[in-house]
Amino acid sequence: MPSSEERTLTLLIYLLSFPSAILVPLIIWLIKKNESEFINFHGKAYFNFLISYAIYGIIAWILVLVLIGIILLPILGIMAFVFTILAAIKSYNGEHYRIPLSMRFFG
């Protein structure tokens, strides 16, 4: 079971992504990834999620031209919000959680 500090830092990776998206989670992950496998796992999971959903967002914006993107963009936004909250809760509970539809760019 991960320590309380590890669980808190992984929680912060996800929750502080709302105001900062990249900067704060990146700092936490880069500083602590060599000290904790758990933090490294969730840092990778978060950035895999971020890159994947950015790609999906770009595709949805392109699909706005054929109107399907108008439906996809809000769905994608809701999914990103819900999955971020779920990941934060599961990481705080000490679980390894991969966000659905995330491509694995980092290990």
Image (tube, grey):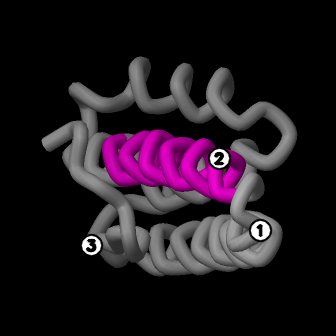
Q: Which one is earlier in the sequence, the residue at label 1 or at label 3?
A: 3
Along the line of sight, the residue nearer the viewer: 92 or 49: 49
Question: Is residue 74 left or right of 68 when viewed as pictured?
Answer: right
Residue 71: quarter of image = bottom right
Q: Secondary structure at mark 2?
A: helix
Question: Does 85 sit left or right of 34 as displayed?
Answer: right
Q: Quadrant of residue 36?
A: top left
Measuring from the top left, give residue 43's x and y in whole percent: 40, 42
Label 1 or label 3, whichever lies nearer to me, is 1
Determine if residue 3 is in view: yes
State the extent of the magenta-drawn residues as a range: 44-63
| Marking on residue 1 | 3
The local crowd at label 3, few if under 14, some if 14 to 19, many if 20 or more residues have their Cα within 10 Å, is few
Left or right: where 107 falls relative to 48: left
Q: Main secondary structure of the magenta part?
A: helix
**Is 9 part of what is drawn in magenta?**
no
Element under disc 3? loop
| Residue occupied by mark 1 | 67
Q: Is residue 6 or residue 84 the one in the foreground?
A: 84
The residue sitting at the left extreme is 107
Pinpoint residue 24: horizontal percent, then vertical percent: 66, 28
In the picture, the quarter occupied by the N terminus is bottom left
